[in-house]
Amino acid sequence: MAIRYQADSNTFILETKDCSYLMKVSRYGNLLHLYYGKRIPDSDVDYLLQLQDRGFSPNPNEAGNDRTFSLDFLQQEFSTDGKGDYRSPSIEVINGDGSAIFSGKVVDYQIDKGKYRIEGMPSLWAADSDRADTLKIRLEDRESRASVTLFYGVFEEKNIITRSVRFENGGNQLLNLNRLMSATVDYRDSEYDLIYFPGRHMMEREFERTPIRSGLHSIGSSRGTSSHQYNPFAIVCERDAGEDHGGCWGYSLVYSGNFLFEAEKDQFGQLRINMGINPKHFSFEMKPGETFWAPEAVLAYSDQGFSGLTHLYHDIYRENLCRSPYGKRPRPVLINSWEAAYFDFDEEKILEIARASVDMGVDLFVLDDGWFGKRDDDNAGLGDWTVNRKKLKDGIEGLSEKIHEMGLQFGIWIEPEMVSEDSELYRAHPEWCLRAPGRPMTRGRNQLVLDLSREDVCGYLIDVLDALLSNARIEYLKWDMNRSISDVWSGLLPRERQGEAMHRYVLGLYRILEEITEKHPQVLFCGCSGGGGRYDPAMLYYQPEIWCSDNTDAVNRLKIQYGTSFAYPVNTMEAHVSVCPNHQTGRSVSLKTRGVVAMDGVLGYELDSRKLSEEEKAFCRRQVEFYKKHYRLIAEGDYYRLSNPYENPRYTAWQHVSKDRRESLVSLVLTDKEGNAGQLYVKLKGLDPDAWYEVEGKEGRYSGALFMNAGIPVPASLGEYESIQFVLRTVQEKK
Ligand code: GLA
């Protein structure tokens, strides 16, 4: 068992292959955090809790005259609130008498084989081959009888610990739950850096590293989605940690709505991490007996730097998150109509584009926005999911059949959560929108948001999606969501429950996705929110890939995909080759470089194939063949970032290495070129130092040790924005 309770020291011990997580029940019943990091053999480490009498640090009543016991500085596993701990708390609850106090003490615990699941929300699952166990510890507030059950899922071989919390009102009075973090982790010191991934529409998940300083550093979203602006993933690392060395802890939240991540350095130089649903505008009314689940946080520790941490997240998210059979299947190479036609098309034009794409070697054609209702631009039609026969005379069924006759599969775009004011749906059901009564509404892309906290709206959308997927041959569905949510108010919730609307919206979204993906397992679902505005593990649970960004510029994509790669596997990032000059930036780069960058993800195309020359089509065909040949290596191998585009202006390079280290693909894009520049060498990673490798298409054989320590020269002839790929393979004999 990876989980033990040691009664003589009152210690809970969680162990994975390489890390240990220890906590202890204090003599007064508080659950204290002792250690999370590299695996240690010790099980009794409570000497780490150094008690002292400190001024202005109150002592709980049960400590009597012991002035050295104070929750103001002790490391807690799930903090109390209103009892002398002034750091940002794990919970905020308003009791029946109006007091804002929660003082959870351990009342019982249970250790189970297997991994717990969360009702109504995505969470990691254990396969038969996984050694996974669950620990539940219940902490009760004696006075209110409210309790929290802390859930820990331990994936022993995969070095992952998951956490979640279930709140229960076990008393007989009404309570208000105003905050419930999924994970709190207290560190004894704060000599660390924080890495997180801020961004914006068309420039998501940029890389930012900053020393942890006194006070509260918080990131999060209040836009109703996990957002373009901040991703629910962050890293705490040792000050000298880098790609290949140093301790780092990852925090990832399996949630698609408003989230919060906090790093607080307190008065004593200690650090508290909190991660969970954003408490802003959040309040749940809890009747006696009612329960509330916090979403799952996925924690990982690596002493092998960021690469080590990335490999842990990539492996667990590839293998234990996505439910779709496509999670592990090779993905079709698609061509999408959006940048080729936008709203301006009819059946003939779509068929021409599809026909011209056949020679490029793609497998699937995706019809993007504009096929339904009165949708000639983005001001109308959302909600009316019936085909526009003026544009598509034989409907979706007819179009899909014709595309299948060309030997291509067919996919379609939809934006189910939205409605345009100029739509039949809005005219019939204006009350189905999130919209505060008596207030002018806030539009985003001239559209409104349907209230997914309502069961009737969810039921309606399930029927719409089911009909669409049942009535035509559709192998791929792109699910979009194109605005930030505002004006949150739900027509079916009473005043005192309005603070529940946003989380209930997310639960409604999961309910729809659950039903539709269960009913149509043969469909490959792709997530999208103006590109990567909802790029989170919860969406990946239902949708194995996500449109990474609306920005298809290959050079900008280097940064976007670099940031995304820290937590999310390459086979979740949809990346398309588009036309040049690029529609978002006006930049032109070669077709080769566009392909090299797009195959650092799930390769696809998004351009008017009618305008490609025969040579260009043949080039695309070779690109697709190359990608397919190396698909397993790219999608399932270990990923190494060879350079940081925020620090290295000259080039960006990355590497895929097969798990057995026998094969590797190295890719490099030159991002800045100076006259008569010094020779560049790129040092490789992850190879077997003792093995001999040959480079495809080149003479000679070289050791893994040489390539990793001395590097490979980058041809001096490479110009700005040009790229190169090397395929390495071990040769039979060993050194
Ligand atoms: C969003 C998506 C794009 C495209 C448009 C259609 O912006 O990210 O890929 O589908 O919507 O309106």
Image: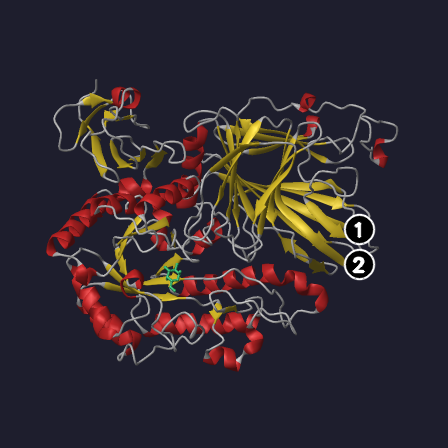
- In the rendered image of this protein, does residue 167 appear above or below residue 303? below
What is the x, y in percent for residue 309? 45, 34
The secondary structure type at the circle numbered 2 is: loop
Please rate how many residues cluster around mark 2, counting C-alpha atoms within 10 Å: few if below 14, some from 14 to 19, many from 20.
some
Q: Is mark 2 within 8 Å of ligand 1?
A: no
| 434, 179: nearer the viewer | 434
Residue sticking out furthest to the front: 675
> Mark 1 = which residue?
144
Residue 11: which disc?
none
Q: Considering only vertical position in the picture, is 473 above or below 88? A: below
Q: Do the numbered discs 1 and 2 sit on residues whose CB atoms are within 8 Å?
A: yes
**Residue 555 x, y percent position in the rendering:** 32, 44
Q: Give the mark, 1 or 2, whose residue is nearer the N terminus.
A: 1
Q: Position of residue 729 (x, y in %)?
A: 20, 31
Q: Which residue is mark 2?
A: 173
Q: On the rendering, which quadrant does ligand 1 occupy? A: bottom left
Q: Is residue 349 above or below residue 139?
A: below
Q: The residue tagged with tag 1: helix, strand or loop? A: loop
Q: Residue at x 22, y 58 (%)?
A: 363
| Position of residue 279 measured from the top left corner of the image (x, y, whole percent) | 65, 52
Please give left or right for residue 469 compared with residue 729 in the image: right
Q: Amino acid at mark 2?
A: Gln
